Amino acid sequence: MTGHLCLRRMPLKGKGRIVSVAAEGELGRRIRDMGLVPGVEVELTGRAPLKDPVALRLRDFTLTLRNNEADYITVEMGGI
Amino acid sequence: MRQIAIALAGNPNSGKTTMFNALTGARQRVGNYPGITVEKKEGVLEIEDGKSVRVIDLPGTYSLTAYSQEELVARNFIVDQRPNVVVDIINTGALERNLYLAVQFMELGVPVILALNMIDEVRKRNITIDSARLAKLMNVPVIETVARTGAGKKELLGKAVAVAEKQREWRPLALSYGPVLDPALEEMSALIEREALLTDRYPARWVALKYLEGDEEVQRLGRSASPAASKLEELAARVTGHCKTMLNTYPEAVITDHRYQYITSALNNGVVTREKANEGIQASDRLDRVLTHPYVGPPLMALILYTVYKITFGLGKTPLTWVQDGFDALGQFAGAVIPEGLLKSLVVSGVIHGVGGIMVFVPLIMIMFFLLSFLEDSGYMARMAYMLDRVLRIFGLHGSSVMPYVVSGGIAGGCAVPGIMSTRTLRSPKEKLATILTSTLMACGAKLPVFILLVAAFFPDDSAMAMFLITMLGWIMALLVAKALRSTIIKGPATPFVMELPPYRIPTLRSMCIHTWEKTSQYLRKAGTIILAISILLWAAMTFPTLPGETLQGFEADKAAIEERIASHKAGSDSESGEIKALEEKATGIENEQAQAALRHSLAGRFGIALEPVSKLAGFDWRTNIALIGGFAAKEVVVATLGTAYSLGEVKSDEPEPLSEKLASDPAWSPLVAASLIVFVLLYSPCLVSVVTMARETSWKWAAFAMTFDTVMAFGLAVAVFQVGKTFL
């Protein structure tokens, strides 16, 4: 079972592989510089008490991202 | 042998500062890069054979783009100052991402050494790193280090010196960026070399790469350097078009992809071997399950914030009282030895009060930064920002804005000076500026005596409620003004919240102490001198012009007459103590009247009187005006100056009872005037020390803006309170 979905919709503790990062400009640059590039495995490790931002685990470290920033990222779940 | 320059670079949380401290010890100088508030730290150390090494601590960055000041500073330092070698401190726990910065240094060509820091943490997680293999694959020297214990420090320094002496020229790394970008890079590099466009500063291929990344700084420099720049921009635009149609992406995304691919393939080629699950990260995750839990996390955070506040101002109280008492004693001593007159007044009221006013903050700043560096180094500060970001974002702020607010008086009694200084941890420029400009609207400790005085006089039955409302008003105004600023003059989209949550670590005492000392000495050196100069100016405004001779003589004559009568009473055998006491009181009364007359006659007094027609709109008379002018030096001075203006002599800000009674019985005062004044004191221009600190963290322009804006806003609201109240009450 594979399906593409927006990073924001990923369930807690869900794991997926990044398919695309659609952000441009400063946001796109910052996201990519932190290693969020297509092909990378990410795990959604937590959500802040108000459900936003989210915490992600990738490449052995944890990163936070606002929901509206996570909207630019598409992941593929399953098969991992 | 000339001096060797080593630049320390690395990601935030890589242990770079710890390594810098381990290398340079106490021999470091802290300053700012010219024109901006990014900190510049360097230290010089002597090594054998009489050689010396200059170590420069570059700001921590994840990349070398032109988006943030930190990254630009790091990049420009390397190309302009050309250090002999860059030591890139790598957090080995997140090796892949940390090498991303290293690759960019290598593309620039500067000699690089990798320090695989925190290697001990990685070993504990049962991960093996073959650093020799990494060195071979990436063709760069690699040293394993543990900055906290100093392990590997000697080898690192030795290697850096060896590289600096051996490798003089820069050797840029040329990565392949795939079939779409590579031909374009070739063509652009050839053009750049032919035209010698910026080649005195950067390698040609690097410039081409930056054009494809759409780097604004390089484009700007290119345009002013050569007309060929427009040709390059055209070429870059064409490639962007290709990328869009053929790959459905942007060149900069392709570039990042390839850099990471290069790193990942090296690491997978026998550098990293994992045996079991990540132990260290699991421990950190378990802590996070509690500390950022949806229901447990926020109350715990409130408790931690309250504790920081309590410790700072509770523990700070004792040394603060010592400093105050010390300067009071010094003032009394100076008052006793210096003969009556202007010199005495200058030394006691100008210099000693001024220096005392600066020193009073020192204990607070020290404790504050000690605790802050604990929260920061432990990793908890990032979690606070994570939990609060959703709320603060509504007002155009950042999750990290909460600490400055709380310290500044979000819990009544704080102080904006350490509050403003604590915004250093905020890396989003717009959010930081909005936080600094609004943190002084909180109910700080120096405003409290004024509130206590007025509440005791006019709202004695609801004092607790009144104080609570004042604190709330501070928060509401700070958030609303922040929102207003972020929607007008500090407009712009929110800085991305792409933030690392570093694993929890126990901070070292050493780095906490060094950090504390840095901040304190910075405050003393930078703020101290200006504050002293301005407090002397304020003293002069409240002293000159002095009373004319005949008025002075009148007071002196009255005093002399009374003293004579006291003397004669004392000489008489039937010394009536009651009568003597009455006469002594009368003498004090005359002295207080003289002080009032002198204040009224001074420049500040005249200014206060001249402002009366306007200030009457808010219900303030000339006495209040003078007190508010004095309050610019420090808010608690409002109480003392009001005392003088009401001929009560010296009123201590912690014993305001006589003044409180006087105001309550004065017909010119009413609860409405008090409410209006409370609003004004809470919101008007930040005190002198805050203004100077603000200017240091932003610019004089913004500090001047805060003074004007806050005063106008405070007056507007005070007028509204007074006028509306007058109509309806």
Image (cartoon, grey):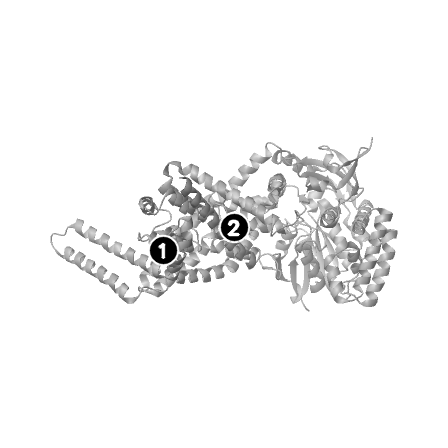
Residue at mark 2: B418
Secondary structure category for the residue under label 1: helix
Whole-number angstrom distance, CA of label 2 to CA of label 1: 26 Å
Q: Residues within 10 Å of mark 2 (few under 14, many from 20)?
A: many
Q: Position of residue B338 (x, y in %)?
A: 33, 64
> B638 or B565, which lies in front?
B638
Chain hosting mark 1? B
Q: Which quadrant is home to the C terminus of chain B?
A: top left
Residue farthest to the top?
Answer: A1
Residue annotated with mark 1 = B329
The residue type indicated by label 2 comes to: Pro
* Residue B468 relative to residue B480: left or right: left
Dot 2: chain letter: B
The one of A41 and B553 positioned closer to us in this rendering: B553
> Going from the N terminus, do you reach mark 2 or mark 1 first?
1
Residue sitting farthest toward the bottom? B1
Q: Are marks 2 and 1 in contact (CB under 8 Å)?
A: no
Q: Position of residue B679 (x, y in %)?
A: 45, 46
- Residue plotted at (82% across, 57% down): B236
Of the 4 image quadrants, the one containing the N terminus of chain B is bottom right
Give the answer, above or below, for where A53 lies relative to B180: above
- Per the rendering, the mark at residue B84 is none
Q: Amino acid at mark 1?
A: Ala
